[in-house]
Image (cartoon, rainbow, N blue to C red):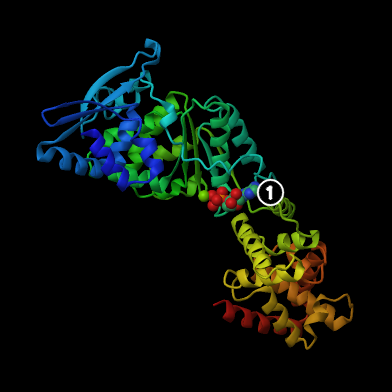
Amino acid sequence: VWSNCLQVIKENIGEQSFKTWFEPIKPISLRESVLTIQVPSQFFYEWLEEHYVQLLKKVIYQELGSEGRLEYSIIIDRGNEANKPQTVNIPTKKIPQAVVNSYRPEQNFIKSPFESKTIDRNFLNSQLNSAYNFENYIEGDCNRLARSAGFAVANKPGTTSFNPLMVYGGVGLGKTHLVQAIGNHIKNSDPNKFVLYVSSEKFVNQFIESVRTNNVQDFANFYLLVDILIIDDVQFLSGKDKTQEMFFHIFNHLHQSGKQIVMTSDCPPRDLKGLEERLLSRFKWGLTADLQSPDFETRMAIIQKKMQSDGIDIPDNVVEYLAYSVDTNVRELEGVLISLIAQSSLNRKEIDLELAKQALKHIIEDVETEVNLDFIQKTVAEYFQVSLDSLKAKTRKKEIVTARQVAMYFAKEFTSHSLKSIGYHFGGRDHSTVIHSVQTVSDLIDTDKKFKVSIQELQKKFKSKAG
Ligand code: ADP
Ligand code: MG
């Protein structure tokens, strides 16, 4: 009967899934429409139930009719009992007895003796992407604390005072990369540790699903097995009270058993609106570290590293140009690199400054606000009746110098470019020149009425354009 079932299953799922999840199953007995199969672990059973229950129901129905039932026999490896496999019979859709006993809602929950049971950790999927490691996580002023705290945690999970470790920062600044690197580091140095990476969104969805299907206990028990819990983007838990409550229990349990918890958020904990106070206060037990936008040197290093690992050569002036021009976040920087590489191979052109400028134009246009550097330079040049090129040239003619200073002043006011980047776009001047220009313009506004009016007129143009 089982081999007939397998035949049908094989036709319905991928080869790899079949190998992983169905080949290890042993049929044990068939008594009065009850088919018993043996699975290697608790987790295995849960996985089958979660992912293949419909398929299994279907094949059992086909083979055994409406009376047909499936029972699982799970090999529980009790570690201290010298690996003697022990078999328990579990009817489908019911929670294994061992699990039920260990689960108590409310207070006792925390003291669940669940750890006494070991499971075959080879079957656990950490949901880690091995591409994220410390090696390719570039260090800079923007991430030094978070990175070194992360590294400490990765080397001694659960035993440093950084528990929980909370990393926060804006989008694309490397939160996910860093926490995944922690997970991979731990996994590589101790494969027996059950590291689990989960996005808060997935956590919420799993929880809701477990409520819907009456499997909340399974859900909780699964998370209590974790040695290192990495939960990404906790801001997503905000306003989800029931999920927060569950997370609170899991958090307490893991923390009390010395398990490491790593979290990320897009803002500092104090700004996490819609999160319960008792949860927020837990977050403060450990260390909170932020990620800032990468500075110029870090951006250079990131570009170089990426290109090196892709085996692509790009000239230094292009690296510099990209690092200057894209100063928002690393993800955007990567986007530009990818597009540059794509354009280079599509057009069969070497990567040079010209191609880089083209690639950037294509990408930044819709990202930048309407009032971008180009617009400011054009508007100011027109207003002062000087040529656009002269703003970027070396000339020190008085009216050009003034126009240039005004344009820098507005660049600082209306764009998010750094002083360095502004200087760069004005013919490669350094940031102190920009500071000086902004200062000069401010002084003139205070002392020269006519000049002040000009500035106000220009300001109106930019403001109306910026909306
Ligand atoms: P977040 O989770 O904060 O939104 P990610 O971790 O997804 O950001 O990072 C976005 C991209 O930038 C990823 O591809 C990541 O590898 C890369 N990245 C971010 N910070 C660094 C860094 N310091 N060094 C190298 N790559 C980085
Ligand atoms: Mg992320």
Q: How many other residues sit within 10 Å of disc 1, few (<14), some (14-19) or many (≥20)?
A: few
Above or below for 118 versus 423: above
Which is nearer the eye, 264 or 53? Answer: 53
In the displayed structure image, the side of residue 63 where residue 344 appears, left or right: right
User: Percent from the top left, x then y, of residue 335?
Assistant: 60, 60
User: Mark 1 falls on what kind of element?
Assistant: helix
Q: Quadrant of residue 315?
A: bottom right
The answer, for residue 345, to whether it is visible in the render is: yes
In the displayed structure image, the side of residue 251 where residue 320 appears, left or right: right
Dividing the image into 4 quarters, which one contains the N terminus? top left
Dividing the image into 4 quarters, which one contains the C terminus? bottom right
User: Percent from the top left, x then y, of residue 149?
Assistant: 61, 35
Residue at image coords 64%, 71%: 414
Above or below for 92 versus 458: above
**Please, what is the three-letter code of the amino acid marked with disc 1?**
Ser
Q: Quadrant of residue 74?
A: top left
In the displayed structure image, the side of residue 44 where residue 318 appears, left or right: right
Residue at image coords 72%, 55%: 312
Residue at image coords 11%, 40%: 65
Badge 1 is on which residue? 309
In the displayed structure image, the side of residue 381 where residue 364 appears, left or right: left
Which residue is situated farthest in the top direction here? 81
Residue at image coords 40%, 25%: 120
User: Percent from the top left, x then y, of residue 281?
Assistant: 45, 37
Q: Quadrant of residue 161?
A: top right
User: Percent from the top left, x then y, of residue 357?
Assistant: 71, 70
